[in-house]
Image: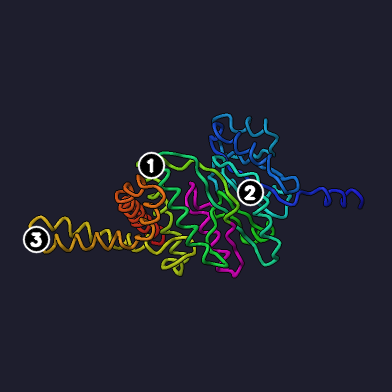
């Protein structure tokens, strides 16, 4: 009995799970940041090496993390493996390319003082100077601005996330059908929200991240999100019109873009259609007038780039969503 009580007493309150695949160049910085957390009891740090072919496992071991190794199955399966092995009653998640700030865990864990809270979400910071990366950071900040309106949210990203372990396991964890980094975290938080669990936004729980910084990387990331989002929307059609993370302008731009493209293709010989295309383009940007104004006030070069990046974003999301829908329909039939 004494030994059992001692094990319970020594259990960490929280376990941090970091999925990693070929993450040797950056995971050391992540682990150093996790070891430097302030204002919290000792954290159990778990790295799940998802079939890496580089020195990820060696770096994790050198930093004293609990190491779990598996054949490559994707981040959803890696996070689930970490949750199964964790000893903490609260699970914290971040990614190998993130550097949590010193009070990151403190702010996430503080949210669970409310016994109704099952999950919590933090936010991104960035030190990057590339135009595309700065635009991406401003996109996230716009979403955080949108999310602050809600007492309860339905959308948690795993770069800065926390869950009660008991509820996480009972809900089945992340769906491993999402075999690549995509929207497995969105699907899981939608699942919990549908079950009536309380999820909250904790903007102070920040992590530094290196965003995609080339146009090609940006396109591929948005295309992948759109592709996998098709499956999520089939499961949760009620989130198609609204969720606590996505500003309405993104949806309107995806709807408007095909009409603008068609009007532009027909405009060469039809002046009236040319005017229509111009009007549609005006409406396209007007849907994000507030965002463009805030960009102009904060970062004028990025505001200029936004006139190219906003339609690029809509095109990538829409084309990915279309192909993802075709894939989903094929799976059904």
Q: What is the basis of the colouring in this image?
A: rainbow
Q: Is residue 215 above or below residue 150?
A: above
The residue that label 2 is drawn on is: 104
Q: Residue at x 56, y 51 (%)?
A: 158
**Residue 316's x, y, as percent?**
34, 51
SS assignment at label 2: helix
| Magenta span contains residue 193 | yes
Which residue lies under the disc numbered 3? 270
Crowd rating for badge 3 (residues with CA inside 10 Å; few <14, some 14–19, many 20+): few
Task: Give the magenta part as a residue range.
Answer: 176-202
Give the image location of residue 249, x and y in percent.
Answer: 37, 62
Front residue (pair 319, 77): 319
**Badge 1 element:** helix
Residue drawn at x 25%, y 61% as measured from the top left: 282
Q: Nearer the viewer, residue 41 or 14?
A: 41
The reply to whether callout 1 and callout 3 are in contact (CB within 8 Å) is no
Direction front: furthest residue: 297
Question: SS for tag 3?
Answer: loop
Residue 131 disc label: 1
Label 2: few (<14), some or many (≥20) within 10 Å? many
**268 on left or right of 34:** left
């Amino acid at each position: 009995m004494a030994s059992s009580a001692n094990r319970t007493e020594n259990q960490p309150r929280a376990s941090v799970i970091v999925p990693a695949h070929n993450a040797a160049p950056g995971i050391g910085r992540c682990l150093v940041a996790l070891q430097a957390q302030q204002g919290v009891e000792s954290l159990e740090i778990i790295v799940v090496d998802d079939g890496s072919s580089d020195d990820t496992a060696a770096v994790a071991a050198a930093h004293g993390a609990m190491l779990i190794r598996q054949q490559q199955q994707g981040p959803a399966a890696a996070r689930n493996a970490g949750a199964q092995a964790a000893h903490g009653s609260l699970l914290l998640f971040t990614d190998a390319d993130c550097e949590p700030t010193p009070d990151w865990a403190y702010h996430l864990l503080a949210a669970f003082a409310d016994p109704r809270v099952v999950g919590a979400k933090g936010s991104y910071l960035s030190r990057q100077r590339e135009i595309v990366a700065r635009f991406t950071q401003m996109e996230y900040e716009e979403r955080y601005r949108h999310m602050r309106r809600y007492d309860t949210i339905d959308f948690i990203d795993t770069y800065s996330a926390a869950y009660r372990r008991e509820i996480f396991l009972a809900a089945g964890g992340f769906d491993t059908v999402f075999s690549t980094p995509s929207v497995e975290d969105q699907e899981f938080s939608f699942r919990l929200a549908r079950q009536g669990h309380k999820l909250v936004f904790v903007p102070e729980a920040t992590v530094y991240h290196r965003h995609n910084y080339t146009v090609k990387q940006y396109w591929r990331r948005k295309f992948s999100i759109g592709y996998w989002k098709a499956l999520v929307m089939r499961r949760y059609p009620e989130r198609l019109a609204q969720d606590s993370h996505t500003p309405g302008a993104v949806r309107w731009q995806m709807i408007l873009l095909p009409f603008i493209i068609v009007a532009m293709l027909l405009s060469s010989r039809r002046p009236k259609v040319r005017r229509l295309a111009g009007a549609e383009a005006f409406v396209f940007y007007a849907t994000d007038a507030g965002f463009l104004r805030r960009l102009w006030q904060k970062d004028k070069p990025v505001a200029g780039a936004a006139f190219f990046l906003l339609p690029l974003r809509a095109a990538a999301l829409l084309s990915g969503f279309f192909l993802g829908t075709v894939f989903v329909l094929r799976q059904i039939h």
